[in-house]
Amino acid sequence: MALRARAKPQASDDDETLFDEAFLAKLELLHVIARRLFRGRQRAERKTRKLGSGLEFADHREYSPGDDIRYLDWTAWVRLRHRLIRLFEEDEDLPIRIVVDVSDSMATRRRAKLRYARQVAAALAYVGLANLDRVGLTCASGSTFETLPAVRGKGRIFQVFQFLKSVAPGGATAMRSALSRVAAQSHQP
């Protein structure tokens, strides 16, 4: 089902919709573009430099007692009479943490800056969720933090929309301390 068909636009403070039909249509286009950029990768997974269990072959190494027999390269055994273990690229999802400034500096007369920041955060979250990465959000203003714990899956975009709509602007601008605090709290969202 298309994203636009499932979403019911809600009015923001200035009676405009924050995530209207045009915005949702653009999000769907971002998903198509992102899919093309990352073609060849398994959905929801990114290759890392780590070797482990995965589907993409990476290398061989000598068999040692205790290795999983399922990874023994029987072709190499038949040809070379040498026991080799197949190694694969480890697949991992990408943890994404999006930090949005909701300080007083974002609350212009018509809140255009805050509206744009919310839409950019929603777009970034949508691309991550469409790739089944874990996406978390933090809205920061001064010493106040509101956090949406990491979620995964394209269907969670509406939870992201609700979170972004619910955060009110206010407080002093202190992005350096906000980013330091978010980084210190965790290495993953």
Image (cartoon, grey):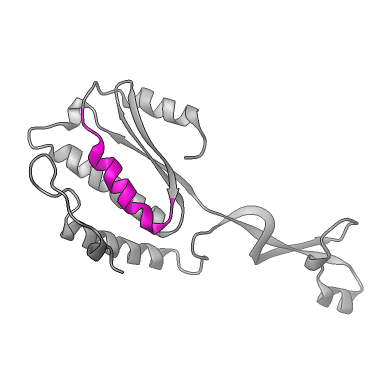
Residue 161, percent across and down? 28, 47
Residue 97, percent across and down? 41, 41
Using the image, determine if residue 81 lies above or below residue 150. below
In the rendered image, residue 62 lying in the magenta stretch gets the answer: no
- Magenta span: predominant SS is helix
Residue 58 is left or right of residue 24, and the answer is right
Q: Residue at x 37, y 57 (%)?
A: 155
- Please give the count of numbered marks on the rendered protein: 0
Residue 103 is left or right of residue 44, and the answer is left
Write down the quadrant of residue 85 in the picture: bottom right
Write down the quadrant of residue 83 in the picture: bottom right
Residue 77, percent across and down? 87, 74
Using the image, determine if residue 167 lies above or below residue 126. above
Residue stretch rendered in magenta on the structure: 152-169
Residue 43, percent across and down? 49, 64
| Quadrant location, the N terminus | bottom left
Using the image, determine if residue 114 lies above or below residue 88. above
Using the image, determine if residue 29 lies above or below residue 152. below
Residue 24 is left or right of residue 108, and the answer is right
Residue 61 is left or right of residue 116, and the answer is right
Q: Residue at x 47, y 40 (%)?
A: 189
Q: Residue at x 30, y 41 (%)?
A: 163
Which of 84/4 is in front? 4
